[in-house]
Image (cartoon, grey):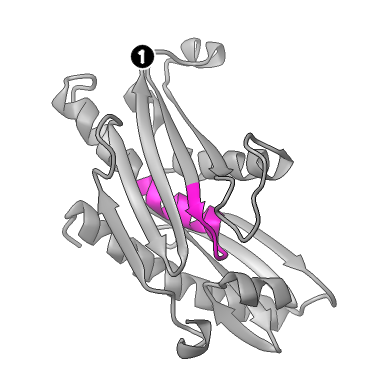
Amino acid sequence: MAKQRKNGEIRPVFIRRNFTRHAEGSVLIRQGDTHVICTASVESRVPEFCKSQGQGWITAEYQMLPRSTHSRSSRGQNSRSLEISRLIGRALRSTIDLKAIEGYTITVDCDVIQADGGTRCASITGGMVALVDALRWMKRKHKVRWLPQFTLVSAVSVGIVNGETVLDLCYEQDSTAEVDLNVVMNDQGRYVELQGTAEHNAFTEKQFSSMRTLAKVGILQLIDLQKKALRIMS
């Protein structure tokens, strides 16, 4: 699949809402051969520090299922999954004023059922859709008086592979990339987070600029797909 794509193209993306029965928001996102189930759960509780600030909370948990890759891994969170969980939580919290959900916690669980690169990015993109559905559920159930205003957020990986800038890296590309950059951006074109690593040699300002430019192209496409899935008029 990677060889059939141009360097500036994202992998085929499919977003299915209401994927599970019980969660207030649930999404299956497929981005190439990376498949993630994202569920958003609403609970009438908040961390202690939120009570004094009159706000709610949004958090996330990420994990890869044991056979989401070629060989089985153990269940449970490790340092990598904890780091990614925090990234997803930060990204989703940036989308709304937490005071609008005072007294409630929304937990977005991202379970990777099949991995082929870009799992943290797909989790943010799918998790955002699940979060919006959870907010809509809160409005329908009169947990909040009005639907909180939100900005959409999405994420994509980009890197330098064989000297060329490539968008939305699959595992094969990611494993051989000279530079790997994950970009999180909202629908206003503002950065939420950048995570970049030079695997071998340091990269230049020109390469960094080219990766950011290409990442923005991909993220705007992903946000458009989020809007279509959520039936939001552009």
Q: Nearer the viewer, residue 210 or 64?
A: 64
| Disc 1 target residue | 44
The answer to whether 216 appears left or right of 221 in the picture is right
**Residue furthest right as drawn:** 201
Identify the residue at horizontal 57%, vertical 73% (top origin). Answer: 169
Identify the residue at horizontal 46%, vertical 67% (top origin). Answer: 33
Tell me where residue 25 sits by quadrant: top left
Taking the magenta stretch, the answer to whether it contains residue 72 is no
Q: Secondary structure at mark 1?
A: loop
CA neighbours of label 1 inside 10 A, class few (<14), some (14 to 19), many (20+): few
Spot occupied by residue 191 in the image (x, y as percentages of width and height): 52, 57
Tell me where residue 146 sits by quadrant: top left
Residue 174 visible in the picture: yes
Identify the residue at horizontal 57%, vertical 81% (top origin). Answer: 166
Spot occupied by residue 198 in the image (x, y as percentages of width and height): 78, 70
Spot occupied by residue 13 in the image (x, y as percentages of width and height): 36, 67
The span shown in magenta is: 112-128
The answer to whether 230 appears left or right of 209 in the picture is left
Q: Is residue 227 placed above or below 198 in the rendered structure?
A: above
- Amino acid type, label 1: Ser
Tell me where residue 16 sits by quadrant: bottom left
